[in-house]
Amino acid sequence: MTAGTVTPYQPGQQTGRDGFAQLLRAEWVKFRTVRGWVIGLVVAVLVMLGLGLFGAVGSNSSCQSTSGGPARSGQGCSTANPPVGPGGEAVSDSFYLVRQPLAGNGSITVRVTSLTGLIPSRNGAGTGTQPGLVPWAKAGIIIKASTQPGSAYAAMMVTADHGVRMQDNFTGDTAGQPGTVTESDPRWLRLTRSGDTITGYDSADALHWAQVGTVHLTGLPLTVQAGLFAASPAYIAVTQGLGGGQNGIIAPSQDTAVFDHVSRSGTWPAGTWTGDYIGADYGSGIGGYHQAGGRFTVTGSGDIAPVVPGQAGGEDLTVTTFLVGTFAGLIAVIVVAAMFITVEYRRGLIRTTLIVSPRRGRVLAAKAIVIGSVAFVAGLVAAAAAVIFGTQLARGRVYVFPVSWLTELRIVVGTAALVAVAAVLALAVGTMLRRSAAAVTIVIVVIVLPYLLGVVSVLPASAADWVLRITPAAAFAVQQAIPQYSQVTALYSPGGSGGGYFPLAPWAGFAVLCGWAAIAVALALVLLRRRDV
Amino acid sequence: MRLPVPANTVPTDTVSANTRAAPRRHPFGLAEALHAEWTKTRTIASTGWLLLAAIALTVAVGAAAAAGTSCPSGVVCQVDPAKVSLTGIDLGQAVVAMVAVLAISNEYSTGMIRITLSAMPRRTVVLAAKAAVLSGLVLAAGTIAVLGSVLAGRLILSGHGFTPAHGYELLSLDSPTVLRAAAGSVLYLALVALLSLGVATAVRDSAVAIGIVLGLLYLFPIVANVVGNAHWHRHLEQIGPMTAGLAIQATTDLTSLPISPWAGLGVLAAWAAAALLAGGLVLRLRDA
């Protein structure tokens, strides 16, 4: 670049033509009049949509390939889709319930003296059982709106490894007293209903009671079902495989709890207790109860909790699958965004640009706003179309996990924002390097390669976790559809068709990308101001 | 995008005319073309730096992957030491692709291509010479990168308990499968370079070319990862240049590979050949 053509930087210059609006308009005109760039963005939208729909069609399920044993509480291809909980999420609601109707307000108190169970033998599924409990085997008392799977509930329970818990409406989970329950160290549990409000208490001796939690179950009918329950989620053995992530052995388990000192207040019928397996269409159906004097022995299998991808070997999708084209779209957008500045350097147009608008920071800002907005719109159109059409295409072929409209909106807008920030990052790196090939390579490598390494390839889980926390690829967390629940045992991994779990929360992951983009823009600004053009 | 033709360069139609008029009696053969390409490549400082960067990044990522790999005692880990050590190829190939793309698109962006084609009107020979010089350079750099990765992997993994005492073989080029993984990875890099050269010759612009190449390489594994249908998943991995080509790195659990090691490298070779063919055809048919 020859120094003779450079206009010195004049900080104080203010002319009528130097308004920021004109600058924006100038950059917009530059963008829309280069046919290759407009085509590039159209290509970005098309590949994003096309690959997303391919993801929807390509997951056309092949049911016979799922591993043996009832997958995820019996949720395979042949059975019905899981029920939906009050919060709109897919849930498992299969357990053994010994119940009586409770009309109006009232309470139920029990003592739990033992929790034992059976898990598949170590030799693998189908080779018998051995004594043992899965970590979230649970038994206790429950107040439930109806026996309909997915209906609202609140429960106090003892668990195998997680102490006393109060859980409600599938996603709520509050810890009570820690420790396991034994004959010598029993647990007392109490649930009190007052209108829509249910309060849970626990105690070690029936003298000193501690309140565990209070929940409001909106729309609870006057007469509810209340009683004793037992549930034991499927046994999942995790094999730490480094090649393709983790492999699980999934088989049903069961647990048996012993209750006594059952006492009630409120309006209960005088009649006998009824024992049923709730949600038999979805669960293993193992369960039963035995009453001798005031002592109840309840056996159950199944779970009362959200259903998440990664629990079963089935072909379940989330809307994230339809956004797999984001990577292809990103590559096209990155190419265009980098060229948006590097072509000015190659053609020498940058000198004209900076003569017309000597305040270089504003030039960079205008370019960033134009390319960021254009990329955002392209990303929004493509992501929205991919989610809408992908869901329609997949319907009937394969199960798509339901998510709330807010989550869907976050995923679509987050994807668009991800594409926009990636474009700004590419623009900044392009400004720094002034060479399109280097800028494009670097930006693709820092965004796409960490995702590939962390999600698809040979990296062990700890390294993958680290890669998806600090690199710009952390931003793909905005596409996570189903949250990770601490009360649900599953193979929570970033990769695989049942995966999509990221170590960072959605917007926190996005903030990591924004941080990188901010650093790049700051460096670009410094270099743009210091260097001759 | 068309390049404006400066007044002081040879008009493009003259170049084409030369090609047509004197296809046989040109003064240069393949040897001269090779020499010319070697001089051009050698005298561009960025080529050397980029190849050094490719070596350094490959070894660094491989060493980091090896350092991040550990196996809790009492658990049988399915670790493929060769594959882990050679993880760096995933990144190194991007730099190699950049070198290859710049080898041709730099000539277009500076207008040098018109001088090149005036001097050597047989365009196929020019492309072949470029491919040969590039392959030689990438093979040399790739050999250093792979040897460095294997050495780093051997030292780091044995420090993490992957020793013969625990049932893992030490990473050594004496083993035929490890040798295949190592030599195959070098060839993989060279084939990626040829694929990139072909694409860049066809599209000319460096940014677009590198975007296409990295898209071809990285998108197949990502898309295959979400496609649940086992049949489609396998087919995607069989046709993807990266997924098929990197099958050469496997030394354990070969039966679970989507494609056998050498066949996988063959798939990548087919991609490279197709790209070079497309690039060569476009180069012959198009004005420079």
Image (cartoon, grey):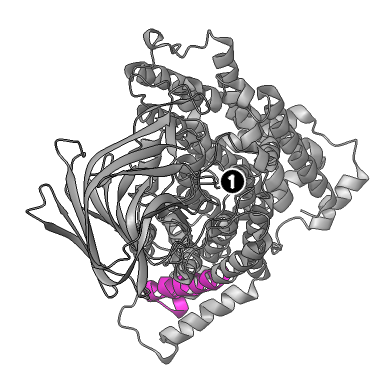
Name of the residue lying farthest toward the bottom? A16
Main SS, magenta residues = helix
Q: Quadrant of residue A236?
A: top left
Residue A83 in the magenta stretch? The answer is: no
Amino acid type for the residue under numbered disc 1: Gly
Question: In terms of secondary structure, where does tag 1 sit?
Answer: loop
Q: Name the spot of residue A120 as percent of width and height, x first.
A: 44, 29
Whether residue A146 is situated above or below residue A115 in the rendered picture? below
Q: Nearer the viewer, residue B108 or B196?
A: B196
> In this view of the protein, which residue sits in the foreground, B4 or B159?
B159
Residue reaching furthest to the right: B21
Please tell me whether residue A162 is drawn above or below residue B185 in the rendered image.
below
The answer to whether one can see residue A491 in this image is no
In the picture, which quadrant includes the C terminus of chain A? bottom left
Residue pictured at 55% horizontal, 67% vertical:
A379
Residue at label 1? A76
Asked if residue A167 can be seen in this view, the reply is yes
Rendering coords of residue B203 (x, y %): 71, 53
Whole-percent x and y of residue B182?
55, 20
Relative to A173, say whether A124 is above or below: above
Q: How many marks?
A: 1
Where, by quadrant of the figure, is residue B228 drawn? top right
Side (left or right) of B20 relative to A73:
right
Label 1 crowd bin: few (<14), some (14–19), many (20+), radius 10 Å:
many
Label 1 resides on the chain identified as A
Q: Which residues are magenta?
A: A354-378
Whether residue A10 is situated above or below residue A226 in the rendered picture? below
The image shows residue A1 at horizontal and vertical percentages of: 48, 60
